[in-house]
Image (spheres, rainbow, N blue to C red):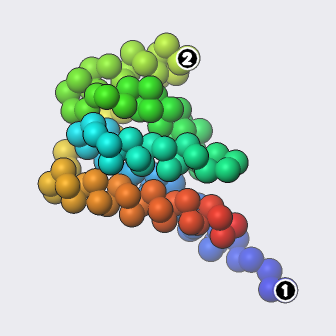
Amino acid sequence: MPEENPCIGNLQQEFTSATEVRLLQLLCQISPGPERSEIFEQILSEPHGYHWRIPEQEVIFQALVQLSGLSGEALRGTLPAQLTRMGFPDIDLTAYFRPLETSDKSDLDRAKQITAALIASQIVK
């Protein structure tokens, strides 16, 4: 069996981490609704839980689940306080609220695609 190239493993990890950030950006900005809730459920219902590559990203996801009825400015104002209550007051959320240049519907579709790809990549490993 050939040895795995460590460079490839690092690139995959960086790509996965960047993809997770993109998903969190979308979840921070997509309007609440059944389809957004479906994305949360899909990740939460993984048999052994989805393994986030960066612990900070998992904490942000958990906070988003707890605040799933909020989006936009309401979420931007509430998320830091939620993270503080969870014991993580120093997380910089700037990257997660960068303006998106697409419609809410295409963002939702993209979030679904990213979720499916992340879960599939975890199953393959």
Q: Number of callouts in the render? A: 2
Judged left or right of residue 86, residue 2 is right
Looking at the image, can residue 10 be seen? no
Q: Residue furthest bottom?
A: 1
**Gap between marks 1 and 2 measured at Cα:** 44 Å
Q: Which residue is mark 2?
A: 87
Please, what is the three-letter code of the amino acid marked with disc 2? Gly
Which residue is at the front of the view, 98 or 82?
82
Where does residue 26 sit, x and y in percent of width and height? 31, 47
Q: Quadrant of the C terminus?
A: bottom right
Q: Residues within 10 Å of mark 1 (few under 14, many from 20)?
A: few
Judged left or right of residue 33, residue 45 is right
Looking at the image, can residue 73 be seen? yes
Tell me which corner region of the image, top left, top right, bottom left or bottom right, holds residue 68: top left
Please, what is the three-letter code of the amino acid marked with disc 1? Met
Q: Residue furthest right?
A: 1
Where does residue 97 sit, x and y in percent of width and height? 27, 38
Provide the secondary structure element on which disc 2 rests. Answer: loop
Tell me which corner region of the image, top left, top right, bottom left or bottom right, holds residue 81: top left
Where 78 sits versus 70, above or below?
above
Q: Which residue is mark 1?
A: 1
Where does residue 77 sit, x and y in percent of width and height? 27, 20
Provide the secondary structure element on which disc 1 rests. Answer: loop
Residue located 44% across and 26% down the image: 66
| Mark 1 or 2, nearer chain start | 1
